[in-house]
Image (spheres, rainbow, N blue to C red):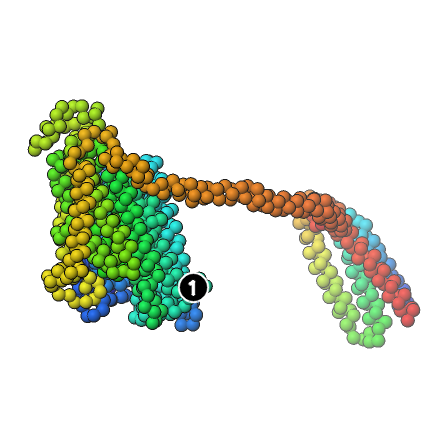
């Protein structure tokens, strides 16, 4: 069985990729995709810690992750809806141009 | 009639209301103004008669009957603890009742007379407004039971006097006379005010009579008389003298008499009402009212109070002084004015030497015959087209028969023609009292004054009514023969023809003439009802008292004096009347120096101009100089100092505070700009911070775990 640190490394690299995507992309949809990646990195951590944890027979980790995925789906839907309405308003999805909250 | 005591305030209140109403009338509402004034005076007269009846009913019980009503005017603090409460009130006693009737009756007659006299004046409404205000204040003065209330009315009376003397204010002489009267009487009033303050500080009350606590009642007087001031004068004497100074100013006694003759610049009814009959008598009335204070002596001392001595001497000197001036005057009203001053001196002499009843009797009789004389003079002036110089009159006996007859009655009453006329009895009594006084000098002065009185009155009558009209050559050119004037038919109408006055003027003259004769009968030695009424004794008529040797001798003496005066005057002026206005006076031919001295009124005005007025002007200049250089300099220096301070302050502001503040603001704004750059509105930038911070935090934690 593959030891736990590999999973953690995989999840950390997934998170780093997602973070980099979220920070560097200018397109709101790509930022959203980056966020989804980071979320799934977290989910992977959950599963890994559950599987290698003290009580793998209880299905708590799986349930948690399924919930998380469900929430993530809802979040993606809300996020996409927001992006659509932002696009309708500003005619762009470039985040650099959406800076009305500038101080 | 007891309700009259409580409603006595109505007597002054009615004319006051009339004055207030006519003050807001339009100038052309002449009838209404006159009706208001005269109507209110009729009511006031009716009430006054009621008051007199009431006073008569209550008199005759040994002491003067006195009913008082007092009320709080205002109070400060709690009167029970230490606050002061000012109380005013009115009093109904024989003195007040007599004065009330006299003032309202004379005022009413003069109001009616003014209807005729002022008929052509455009400020008729204003005139009646002032007259009513005067009557109100005078009536208030008479009934006042508090020196304070009396003083208030006293000052209103002075104000109306000022307003009425200056009624024709477009005449410079009238305006000057009004100011002179006002300022001269103020000098006396200042002393009166001081006396009032002193009295209040000594006794704590200004009420005359207050059921034993008033300042004229025994307990207060005993306290006042017992104390002595640092000058060795009893406190009561000091206060009395100060109060008397007020009376001197108001009643035109020497040395403050100068305003009264000048006051004749006012309309003649005013001269009659205010400056002969009532207002100037207020000073005499004041002395009569505070007579207990004047007469207060310490217990067990039986000397004549020094305040009364002063009163007597001032009165006697004034009587002769003014009478002698009157001898040489040529203005019909000025002669009467000096005569008034002289008669007021007689009243003071009577008050000082004989007491309240003596002085007041002369006051009352004088009010009637002097009002009569003034109104007669007004009638003459009116009839002669505003001519006031007696040298330019003459021969009016036939042209103005009613005026002549009534004037002759007034003249005889003033001269003291024996037995019939009131002036004889009142003057007689004054002389009688003066004779029994501590020194006989005032008596001799009084006799000499009486002689002069008879002399100048007959002189005036001869000038005005006898002889031929002397109204100037060119003015008389159209009358070819003076004898045509003597016919009963009215003379040909001409600009300068004298004519009899209208009924509104002659009826008051006749009424006053009747009173001038009849009033003497209530105060003869045979039946001294008046004196008894004022002193509270019951008197019985007894003709025999006339023939007591002392009385009889004096009566013969004063009759002789009067006849001597009348005879001398007739000898000089009546025998051979002047034929032209330019002819010099008979006395002037005999004694030009003395006549000039008298004509110029002993140069009192000039002396005042050279001393008091010059000193005043000098003092004003000193004050002006002080103002200009000292006080102004001080103020200027202060203002310069302040300006300097303000300039310093300005510099500080401009160069320290302002730049500092500006710099602070600038920095703050810059800092804000810097901080605002962090908030770029770019979500990713925020996220980047979060990411960096998270990394740093994680590293820190890892490093922390390692080291532990």
Q: Would you place residue B482 above or below residue B552 in this image?
A: above
Label 1 packing within 10 angstroms: few (<14), some (14-19), many (20+)? few
Residue B127 in sight here: no
**How far across and how far down the image is residue A51, in percent?**
84, 71
**How far across and how far down the image is residue B219, in percent?**
34, 71
Q: Would you place residue A20 above or below residue B221 in this image?
A: above
Tell me how many marks there are.
1
Instruction: Residue under label 1, please give it.
Output: B232
* Placement of the C terminus of chain B among the 4 image quadrants: bottom right
Q: Place residue B46 in its image quadrant.
A: bottom left
- B79 or B466: nearer the viewer: B466
Looking at the image, residue B643 sits to the left or right of residue B684; the answer is left
Q: Residue at x 15, y 60 (%)?
A: B549
- A87 or B420: nearer the viewer: B420
- B420 or B490: nearer the viewer: B420
* Placement of the N terminus of chain B among the 4 image quadrants: bottom left
Q: Extreme right residue here?
A: B707
**How far across and how far down the image is residue B11, in percent?**
23, 57
- B330 or A52: nearer the viewer: B330
Q: Secondary structure at mark 1?
A: loop
């Amino acid at each position: 069985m593959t030891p736990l640190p590999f999973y953690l490394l995989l999840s950390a690299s997934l998170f780093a990729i997602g973070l980099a995507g979220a920070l560097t992309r200018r397109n709101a949809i790509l930022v959203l995709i980056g966020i989804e990646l980071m979320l799934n990195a977290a989910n992977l951590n959950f599963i890994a810690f559950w599987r290698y944890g003290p009580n793998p027979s209880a299905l708590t980790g799986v349930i948690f992750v399924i919930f998380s995925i469900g929430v993530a789906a809802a979040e993606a839907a809300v996020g996409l809806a927001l992006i659509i309405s932002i696009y309708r308003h500003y005619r762009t999805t470039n985040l650099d141009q959406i800076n009305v909250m500038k101080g | 009639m007891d309700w009259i005591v409580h409603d006595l305030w109505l007597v002054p209140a009615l004319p006051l209301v009339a004055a207030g109403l006519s003050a807001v009338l339009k100038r052309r509402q002449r009838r209404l103004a006159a009706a208001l004034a005269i109507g209110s005076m009729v009511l006031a007269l009716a009430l006054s008669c009621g008051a007199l009846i009431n006073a008569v009913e209550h008199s005759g019980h040994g002491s003067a009957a006195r009913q008082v009503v007092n009320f709080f005017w205002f109070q400060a603090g709690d009167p029970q603890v230490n606050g002061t409460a000012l109380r005013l009130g009115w009093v109904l006693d024989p003195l007040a009742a007599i004065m009330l009737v006299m003032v309202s009756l004379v005022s009413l007659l003069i109001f009616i007379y003014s209807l005729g006299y002022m008929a052509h004046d455009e400020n008729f409404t204003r005139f009646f407004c002032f007259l009513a205000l005067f009557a109100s204040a005078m009536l208030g003065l008479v009934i006042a039971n508090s020196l304070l209330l009396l003083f208030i009315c006293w000052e209103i009376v002075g104000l109306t006097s000022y307003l009425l003397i200056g009624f024709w204010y477009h005449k410079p002489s009238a305006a000057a006379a009004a100011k002179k009267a006002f300022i001269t009487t103020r000098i006396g009033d200042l002393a009166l005010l001081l006396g009032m303050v002193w009295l209040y500080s000594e006794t704590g009350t200004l009420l005359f009579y207050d059921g034993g606590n008033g300042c004229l009642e025994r307990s207060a007087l005993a306290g006042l008389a017992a104390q002595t001031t640092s000058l060795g004068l009893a406190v009561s004497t000091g206060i009395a003298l100060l109060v008397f100074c007020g009376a001197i100013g108001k009643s035109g006694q020497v040395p403050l008499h100068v305003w009264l003759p000048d006051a004749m610049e006012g309309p003649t009814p005013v001269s009659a009402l205010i400056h002969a009959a009532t207002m100037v008598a207020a000073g005499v009335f004041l002395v009569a009212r505070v007579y207990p204070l004047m007469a207060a002596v310490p217990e067990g001392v039986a000397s004549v109070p020094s305040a009364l001595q002063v009163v007597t001497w001032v009165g006697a000197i004034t009587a002769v002084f003014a009478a002698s001036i009157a001898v040489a005057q040529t203005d019909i009203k000025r002669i009467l004015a000096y005569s008034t001053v002289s008669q007021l001196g007689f009243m003071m002499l009577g008050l000082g030497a004989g007491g309240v009843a003596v002085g007041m009797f002369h006051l009352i009789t004088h009010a009637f015959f002097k009002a009569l004389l003034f109104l007669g003079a007004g009638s003459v002036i009116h009839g002669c087209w505003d001519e006031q110089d007696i040298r330019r009159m003459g021969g009016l006996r036939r042209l103005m028969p009613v005026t002549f007859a009534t004037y002759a009655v007034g003249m005889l009453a003033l001269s003291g023609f024996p037995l019939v006329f009131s002036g004889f009895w009142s003057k007689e009594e004054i002389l009688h009292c003066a004779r029994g006084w501590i020194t006989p000098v005032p008596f001799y002065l009084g006799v000499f004054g009486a002689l002069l009185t008879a002399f100048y009155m007959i002189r005036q009558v001869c000038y005005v009514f006898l002889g031929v009209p002397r109204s100037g050559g060119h003015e008389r050119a159209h009358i070819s023969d003076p004898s045509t004037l003597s016919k009963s038919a009215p003379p040909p109408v001409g600009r300068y023809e004298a004519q009899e006055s209208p009924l509104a003027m002659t009826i008051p003259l006749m009424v006053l003439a009747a009173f001038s004769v009849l009033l003497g009968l209530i105060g003869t030695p045979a039946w001294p009802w008046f004196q008894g009424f004022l002193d509270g004794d019951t008197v019985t008529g007894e003709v025999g008292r006339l023939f007591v040797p002392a009385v009889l001798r004096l009566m013969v003496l004063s009759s002789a004096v009067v006849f001597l005066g009348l005879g001398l005057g007739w000898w000089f002026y009546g025998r051979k009347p002047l034929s032209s206005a330019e002819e010099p006076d008979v006395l002037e031919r005999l004694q030009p120096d003395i006549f000039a001295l008298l004509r110029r009124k002993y140069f009192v005005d000039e002396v005042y101009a050279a001393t008091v007025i010059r000193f005043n002007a000098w003092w004003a200049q000193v004050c002006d100089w002080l103002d200009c250089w000292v006080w102004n300099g001080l103020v200027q220096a202060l203002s310069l100092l302040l300006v300097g301070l303000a300039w310093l302050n300005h510099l500080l502001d401009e160069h320290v505070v302002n730049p500092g503040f500006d710099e602070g603001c600038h920095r703050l704004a810059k800092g804000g700009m810097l901080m605002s750059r962090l908030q770029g509105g770019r979500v990713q930038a925020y996220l980047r911070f979060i990411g960096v911070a998270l990394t740093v935090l994680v590293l820190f934690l890892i490093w922390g775990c390692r080291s532990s």
